[in-house]
Image (cartoon, grey):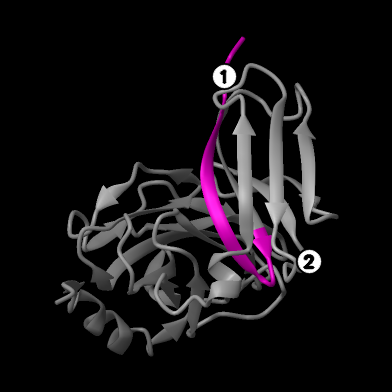
């Protein structure tokens, strides 16, 4: 029988959130507004699942915004973390049923930022894990908005889970250039190789034009640090893994 950790901490928030709604628009990369809705991310059980959302201050003045995360219904023996300004290390489920970021962001009006990322590591477990993410004005925490992000590693069909037939990344860690040997199944469409930094910001991307292709990330294109590379196809992220660019 599958074990699922659930939290009742978010119930009070959902009730209280009717007091005021933060005027921050949360969208995905396709421009779909996700405020106060459920955003489902599909992946596979043996890979880190990575969801990125964009935030924009719709007010005429700046405000200082923070994000907190509730574990609402999460598979046992999994791990998770998220980024808002900075990223924290991965933690086993139950370690932080309520996780409040210590780093806040001063959001200017009309400026879209892409430094929010949510990560779920199924550790080989199949199932659905959901987290409630809340954006709020630090001057008035009741002024908030939310997105319920669910990571689904169970209902992914063969066409989604089997998009990547070969992926060799070398050297990793790298002192300079990185080679990506990629082979995709014939049904893969609109495929991209995307790299995010630890702030969740997209720092590099390129289209995968053929079913089998070697892509080279040139020396100096990324500064030394830790990154995450993803392959997206058919409108979903097929795989996300860590990339390290070492200091020479």
Q: Which residues are magenta?
A: 232-248
Of residues 209 and 246, the one nearer the viewer is: 209
Residue 13, label in figure: none
First along the sequence among labels 1 and 2:
2
Residue 190, label in figure: 2
Residue under the point 47% across and 43% down:
86
Q: Quadrant of residue 15?
A: bottom left
Q: Quadrant of residue 62?
A: bottom right
Of residues 107 and 71, the one nearer the viewer is: 71
Residue under the point 63% across and 63% down:
163
Residue under the point 22% across and 58% down:
93
Residue 127 on image: x %, y %? 33, 74
Please state if 146 lies on the left or on the right of 246 as rendered: left
Q: CA distance from mark 1 to mark 2?
A: 31 Å
Residue found farthest to the right: 209
Q: Quadrant of residue 134?
A: bottom left
- For disc 1, the marked residue is 246
Query: How many other residues sit within 10 Å of disc 2, few (<14), some (14-19) or many (≥20)?
Result: few
Residue 94 on image: x %, y %? 18, 60
Of residues 115 and 30, the one nearer the viewer is: 30
SS category of the residue bearing label 1: loop
SS category of the residue bearing label 2: loop
Residue 209 on image: x %, y %? 85, 55
Of residues 24 and 114, the one nearer the viewer is: 114
Residue under the point 29% across and 80% down:
13
């Amino acid at each position: 029988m599958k074990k699922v950790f659930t939290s009742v901490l978010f119930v009070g928030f959902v009730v209280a959130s009717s007091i005021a709604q933060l005027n921050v628009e949360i969208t995905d990369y396709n421009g779909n507004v996700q405020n106060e809705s459920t955003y489902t991310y599909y992946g596979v059980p043996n890979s880190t699942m990575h969801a990125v959302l964009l935030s924009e201050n719709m007010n005429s003045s700046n405000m200082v915004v923070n994000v907190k995360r509730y574990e609402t219904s999460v598979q046992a023996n999994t791990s998770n973390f998220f980024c808002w300004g900075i990223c924290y290390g991965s933690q086993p489920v139950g370690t932080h049923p309520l996780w409040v970021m210590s780093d806040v962001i001063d959001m200017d009006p009309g400026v879209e930022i892409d430094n929010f990322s949510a990560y779920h590591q199924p550790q080989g477990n199949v199932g659905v894990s959901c987290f409630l993410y809340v954006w709020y004005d630090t001057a008035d925490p009741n002024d908030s908005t939310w997105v319920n992000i669910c990571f689904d590693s169970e209902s992914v069909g063969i066409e989604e889970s089997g998009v990547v037939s070969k992926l060799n990344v070398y050297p990793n860690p790298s002192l300079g250039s990185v080679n990506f040997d990629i082979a995709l199944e014939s049904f893969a469409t609109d495929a991209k190789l995307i790299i995010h930094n630890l702030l969740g910001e997209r720092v590099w991307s390129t289209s995968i034009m053929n079913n089998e292709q070697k892509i080279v990330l040139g020396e100096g294109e990324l500064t030394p640090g830790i990154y995450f590379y993803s392959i997206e196809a058919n409108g979903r992220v097929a795989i996300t893994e860590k990339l390290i660019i070492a200091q020479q």
